[in-house]
Image (tube, rainbow, N blue to C red):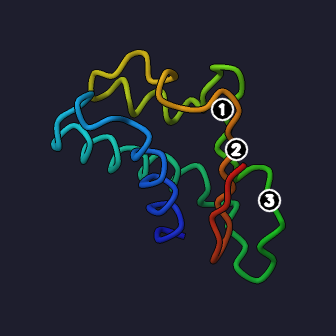
């Protein structure tokens, strides 16, 4: 689970320009977001039936309504308007052995 979550968080953090935060802020953002998502998914990770709980394990961003964990991790490092860095319609599914997006 941790490998897939880290992959998704890395994908998200690549959308944030390097001039928007320091390396230390980026590391803190990533670590905090991995922690938040790991806690959220802990009871919804089914290795033997990966599609079970698929919708629950989605990180969604629709029309500037960002996933609350992403917003909270960004605010922790001082990024307030993080929605400007992401497409207006993004979904990332984090499943056992697979991370995908649309």
Q: Position of residue 99 (x, y in %)?
A: 63, 64
Give the image quarter of residue 61. top right
Q: Which of 51/36 is in front?
A: 51
Residue 91, label in figure? 2
Circle 1 Cα neighbour tier, 10 Å, few/some/many (<14 / 14–19 / ≥20): some
Q: Residue at x 70, y 60 (%)?
A: 44
Tell me how far mark 3 sits from mark 1, CA to CA. 18 Å
Using residue 85 as the reference point, say whether residue 50 is left or right of it: right
Cβ atoms under marks 2 and 1 closer than 8 Å: yes
Residue 53, label in figure? 3
Circle 3 Cα neighbour tier, 10 Å, few/some/many (<14 / 14–19 / ≥20): some
Q: Residue at x 32, y 40 (%)?
A: 29
Q: Residue at x 73, y 73 (%)?
A: 46
Disc 1: which residue? 61
Mark 2 or mark 1: which comes first in sequence? 1
Mark 3 or mark 1: which comes first in sequence? 3
Q: Is residue 13 above or below residue 80?
A: below
């Amino acid at each position: 689970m941790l490998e897939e979550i880290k992959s998704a968080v890395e994908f998200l953090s690549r959308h944030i320009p390097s001039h928007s935060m320091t390396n230390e802020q980026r590391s803190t953002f990533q670590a905090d977001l991995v922690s938040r998502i790991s806690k959220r998914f802990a009871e919804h990770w089914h290795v033997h039936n990966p599609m079970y709980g698929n919708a629950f394990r989605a990180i969604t961003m629709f029309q500037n309504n960002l996933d609350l964990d992403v917003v909270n991790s960004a605010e922790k490092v001082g990024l307030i308007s993080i929605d400007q860095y992401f497409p207006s319609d993004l979904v990332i599914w984090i499943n056992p052995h697979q991370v995908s997006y649309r």
